[in-house]
Image (cartoon, rainbow, N blue to C red):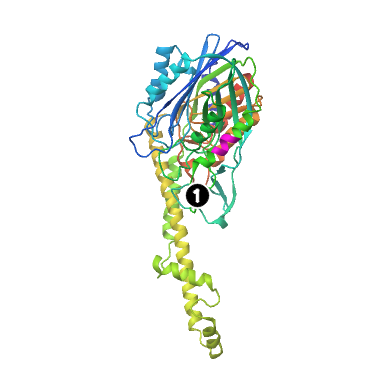
Amino acid sequence: MKSTTFILILFAVFCLFPAGTGHAAQVFAGVAKADITDYAAGPVNDPLYVKALVLKEDTATVALITVDAVAIGELGRIGNSFLANVRAQLQRDLAIPASNVLINASHCHGVIRTDTATLAAQTVAEACRNLVPVSIGAGVGRESRIMENRRLKLRNGAEADVRRAYALPPDEDVVASGPVDPDIGLLRIDRKNGGTLAVVYTFACHPIMGVPGGGNTADFPGFASKVIEENFGDGAIALFLQGCAGDVNPASYKAVYSPRNAETLGNLLGLSAMRALKKIEPREKGGLKLVTGVVALPRGTDLKQRISRLEAEQTRLVQSLNGTSLNLKAFIPLYVQYALSSNYPAYYSYRYLQDEPQGREELKKLDAGNRADIERYIQNVHVMEQLTRLQENLRLLKMHHAQNEASGEKTVAAEIAVLKIGDFVLTTFPGEPSVEVGLNIKRRSPHPLTFTAGYCNGYLYYAPTAKQRNNTGFAQEDCDCILAPEWQKAYEEKAAAILKKL
């Protein structure tokens, strides 16, 4: 089905649900948090939390929930019933409409309690009990040191990605990497009687750095939130919203010569956020508006063909392996020996100099054979590295092809929302969009402080750009994906249309 058809579907299924009356009435806010760390699952480095911010204007109430978890459904401890269960309890107990509940996963890979849904609902209830009149301010900070785009553009026109699951292409094959978004979207909420009540901040980067001891951790968002909360004090709560981080890794993610430490990255992010937050002056009134709906996005119908292409490439690579007399034990010392002395590797130079006048070439012939074996061995290693990448991506493609086939549907429902709180504007997506998607929405929005949060209200796996999705080289984002390339244009155009009318 053509992308234009899906755009028409998008406009047909969306409805507007304004959370406010259109005028800037007094906004009330309440916050709360609960520890959701599974302390029985193993060593704990730092706690994981569910946090809730409840906003009320006139008769409308919006609940924003953040969870230190990998996703809202599909992955980890949060099952696919989590969103519906939390919403149902909030609607039953607090009369908050289901569409007015937004839940974001930080995408950290910590282990949380199995009763997190109950704790989430309790946290919202506590926040409702703590409602106070507030003033609201918005702004933007900047942090460019803690992340890197993990998509590598290769000399042959393909793209690979940076993962711990497999080796990277040789340096000489890499010509460029993709963009990052240094913006920190900031919402500051102050009590009218003094002091900061809450901070909402959004940033795009995978929280998968971990800590040196390997314990359970909320990763860099947990450390950044701690910096913000401790600086403001007085019970202030910082809620982290994960951005369009589908193709963004922590900086130096593949480093092997120093321990990986998310605390360093989180401290940098927290301090950069604080620097900008201090400059924000909350206003008396904010204004609250919410637009929600469900988008029918096209499922990938070409996954079977992509699987066939990948299997063919796998076969080609296996057939390209060359025999060599070397094994790892022989290769390493031989490679070092020939790297140390390229002119006289087999013996000291004087032996070569004595043999040459006598017409003896035994050492030179030995060197030629060894160099050929070394080169074949290295080529085999590179092929092996490519095969490890292809094998993992092939597994992902087969899994999602089976999912799409089992669904019996050509589209998948994607719940999205656009939330406006004063000058702070947030669009959401229930998956892992690439950073370029968020940058595009930001550029097209008439609102200067527009930000996009992925990982919200469901999980549809990776959502790469159309170009990434059609990558000839295959990477995790374009293989761990159930969507067709046309999803990007459909989503971006719908988000832009809503933003213009907001």
User: Which residue matches tag 1?
Assistant: 254
**Of residues 219 and 406, which is closer to you in this image?**
219
Does 292 appear above or below 257?
Answer: above
120 on left or right of 131: left
If the image is split into quadrants, where does the C terminus sit?
top right
**Of residues 396 and 203, which is closer to you in this image?**
203
**Of residues 335 and 228, which is closer to you in this image?**
228
Does 124 appear above or below 3?
Answer: above
Q: Amino acid at mark 1?
A: Lys
Residue 273: x, y in percent?
59, 32
Segment tinted magenta in the rendering:
267-271
Residue 161: x, y in percent?
51, 46
Residue 455: x, y in percent?
48, 31
Residue 162: x, y in percent?
50, 47
Residue at coordinates 43% horizontally, 53% vertically from top-left?
387
- Neighbor class of circle 1 (other Cα within 10 Å; few <14, some 14-19, many 20+) is some
Say whether residue 327 is visible: no
Q: Secondary structure at mark 1?
A: loop
Q: Is residue 269 magenta?
A: yes
